[in-house]
Amino acid sequence: MEFIKSIIKNRKLIFQLGKNDFRNRFANTTLGSLWGFLQPFVFMATYVIVFQYIFKTPGPENAPYIVWFLPGMAMWQALNDGILSASSSIRTYSYLVKKVVFPVDVIPIISIVASSFVALFLFAVATVVCIIFGFVPNVLQLIYIIISAYAFMIAFTRLTSAITTLVPDFSQLLTILMQLFFWFTPVVWNTSMLAGHPTILKILQCSPFTYLVTGLRDSFMGTTNIVTNGNGIYTIIFWVITIIIFLWGNYIFKKNKKDFADVL
């Protein structure tokens, strides 16, 4: 596929521009790129302090709240930051689209790479903390879920980046939608709370966001979201949704790519 070939061909350029993108986000601050790591870390630490040590909220299956919470929140932070930044990336890099011959297809990937520095840091923090508390991750599932997350982000932002370029107001709508997805995804609440509402629970479990958040969390909790415990159907649903979104986004992107320079 042309899109995949373009990523492979420009992989060095993508990584270099992604690294520069991350640095430039904090270029005018004293601590520089450290703010990129410090802000989400403090945010997650605040949740842990409030719920585990002040409210003394227990985690499911007698696990500490921090072990249950950190992996899920790390995944959500990665998804949220990657999707929002990549969706507006073509407008951010408008000078590349308008003034030079540049592979426009890879621009959203650049923003995803830029967001990955913080995302991988948060994954590492969650892993270290869980191991300290005696919860060793299922490494194969951990790798699978992270790869799945990036596959979904690439597919999703293939669609949203094209729409945002053509309709600037869509970026504001997407921000609102991501806030709604946050509360409808079991990031700070447990799916067991919906035990009395099986239909609603099944609908939420079909969400790619739920699949990825619970999948990373389950990597540390001793269960799996891939093929066991009757959850294999959600893996199929996740990949079907991801492929459909990618094909839809790829069609819109390719159809309107020639017009991007005119609307920027």
Image (cartoon, grey):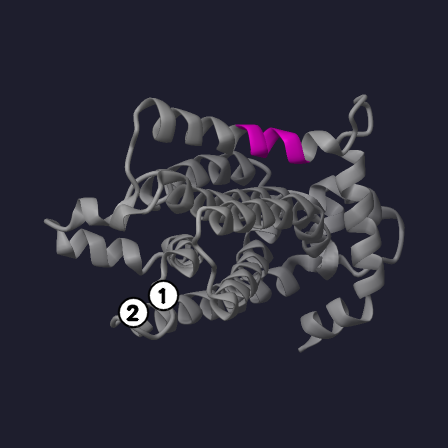
Amino acid at circle 1: Asn
At label 1, counting other C-alpha atoms closer than 10 Å, the crowd grade (few under 14, some 14-19, many 20 or more) is: many
Q: CA distance from mark 2 to mark 1?
A: 6 Å
Where residue 107 sits: x, y (%)?
73, 54
Badge 2 amino acid: Asn
Question: Mark 1 = which residue?
Answer: 225
- Front residue (pair 183, 173): 183
Residue occupying the point 84% across, 62% down: 12
Image coordinates of residue 69 in percent, x first then y, are 40, 42
N-term mark: 2 or 1 = 1
Identify residue for label 2.
Answer: 231
Q: Quadrant of the C terminus?
A: top right
Name above or below for residue 10 compared with residue 134: below
> Quadrant of the rendered structure where residue 187 is?
top left
Mark 2 touching mark 1, by CB under 8 A? yes
Q: Is residue 121 left or right of residue 106?
A: left
- Residue 199 on image: x %, y %: 15, 56
Helix, strand or loop for the magenta stretch, by majority: helix
Residue plotted at (47% across, 60% down): 137
What is the total number of numbered labels drawn onto the structure image?
Answer: 2
Q: Nearer the viewer, residue 218 or 26?
A: 218
Is 71 included in the stretch rendered in magenta?
Answer: no
User: Which corner quadrant of the image does residue 205 belong to?
Assistant: bottom left
Of the pair 256 and 124, the residue shown nearer to us:
124
Q: In terms of secondary structure, where does tag 2 sit? A: loop
Mark 1 lies on a secondary structure that is loop
Numbered range of the magenta stretch: 37-42
Which image quarter is the N terminus in?
bottom right
Residue 263 visible in the shown view: no
Rendered view: 99 above or below 245: above
Residue depicted at x 28% and y 37% = 58
